[in-house]
């Protein structure tokens, strides 16, 4: 087996290991890469290339789910269980930017609208509110990114392995690496993001009238949201009911 290394800016080959077993070890080409934990690597991770590959795979998985005959609740759950993990697995490894994550959330909403699972006039924040609280239970990619990076930081901070101690020391000594204060900030952001999303929905002048009308002590919210929690209807029907509750379409109640 040959090993490639740099010498004065030029790639050189050097015999490193001779394979004497039955399994042949193929030589890694100059521009080749090996896959470790689903991420292609050579002497470094090709972040731009990997992001493009992950985006395409995520969109492909999302399209396959939306093309199924699943009901509204099961489609949302399938997106969280099958599509979002395609991206979640790379969080903390690939250098994602906040704008890229937000763009993926917008792409998801556009596809939901295209496949008539989300009405274009319906509230966006309500999509990400849990179903038991009146939302539709879609996992927000930005929130998933925050959760995964926070969990990774907590793991590195708490582990006692020698190599992890070295990484932790390097993080503390590097200004560009997340420190403990940054980790605590991320933890608070992760914990508050769901509540903030719900509050944004409730405070909206038009879309927020419905959740505010349920604050009456005589209203049983659990029973009110039972149809969302247990699902069973088509995504198109659910989307239409939600946009009507948001008063974003001309119903007779809205006219009055």
Image (cartoon, rainbow, N blue to C red):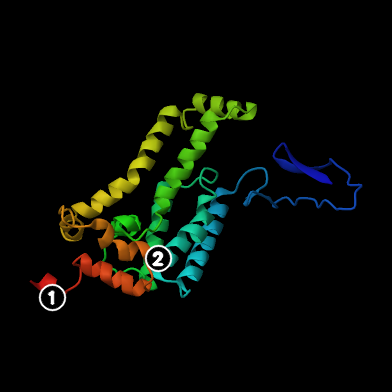
Identify the residue shown where x is 64% and y is 49%: 37
User: Quarter-wise, where is residue 182 in the image?
Assistant: top left
Q: Earlier in the sequence, mark 1 or mark 2?
A: 2
Query: Disc 2 on helix, strand or loop?
Result: helix
The location of residue 19, given as percent across then percent down, is 88, 47
Quick one: 85 or 104, which is closer to the camera? 85
Q: Quadrant of the C terminus?
A: bottom left
Q: Residues within 10 Å of mark 2 (few under 14, many from 20)?
A: many
Q: Is residue 238 left or right of residue 79?
A: left
Above or below: residue 51 compared with residue 230: above
User: Quarter-wise, where is residue 216 in the image?
Assistant: bottom left
Query: Disc 1 on helix, strand or loop?
Result: helix
Q: Residue furthest left?
A: 256
Q: Which mark, residue 73?
A: 2
**Distance CA(mark 1)–CA(mark 2):** 28 Å
The location of residue 238, given as percent across then percent down, is 32, 70
Quick one: 235 or 175, which is closer to the camera? 235
What residue does disc 1 label?
252
The location of residue 92, given as percent across then percent down, is 52, 43
């Amino acid at each position: 087996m040959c090993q490639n290394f740099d010498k004065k800016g030029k790639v050189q080959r050097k015999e490193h290991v001779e394979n004497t077993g039955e399994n042949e070890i193929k030589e890694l080409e100059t521009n080749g890469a090996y896959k470790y934990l689903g991420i292609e690597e050579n002497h470094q991770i090709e972040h731009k290339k990997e992001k493009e590959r992950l985006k395409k795979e995520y969109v492909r998985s999302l399209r396959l789910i939306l093309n199924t005959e699943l009901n509204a609740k099961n489609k949302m759950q399938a997106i969280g269980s099958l599509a979002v993990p395609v991206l979640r697995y790379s969080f903390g490894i690939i250098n994602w930017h906040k704008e890229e994550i937000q763009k993926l959330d917008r792409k998801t909403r556009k596809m939901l609208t295209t496949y008539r699972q989300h009405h274009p006039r319906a509230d966006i924040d309500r999509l990400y509110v849990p179903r038991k609280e009146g939302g539709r239970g879609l996992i927000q990619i930005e929130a998933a990114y925050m959760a995964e990076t926070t969990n990774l930081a907590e793991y590195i901070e708490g582990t006692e392995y020698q190599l992890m101690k070295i990484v932790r020391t390097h993080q503390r000594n590097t200004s560009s690496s997340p420190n403990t204060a940054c980790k605590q900030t991320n933890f608070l952001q992760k914990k508050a993001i769901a509540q903030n999303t719900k509050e944004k929905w409730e405070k909206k002048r038009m879309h927020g009238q419905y959740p505010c009308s349920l604050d009456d002590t005589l209203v049983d919210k659990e029973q009110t949201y039972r149809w969302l929690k247990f699902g069973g209807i088509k995504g198109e029907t659910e989307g239409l009911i939600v946009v009507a509750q948001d008063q974003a379409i001309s119903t007779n109640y809205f006219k009055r």
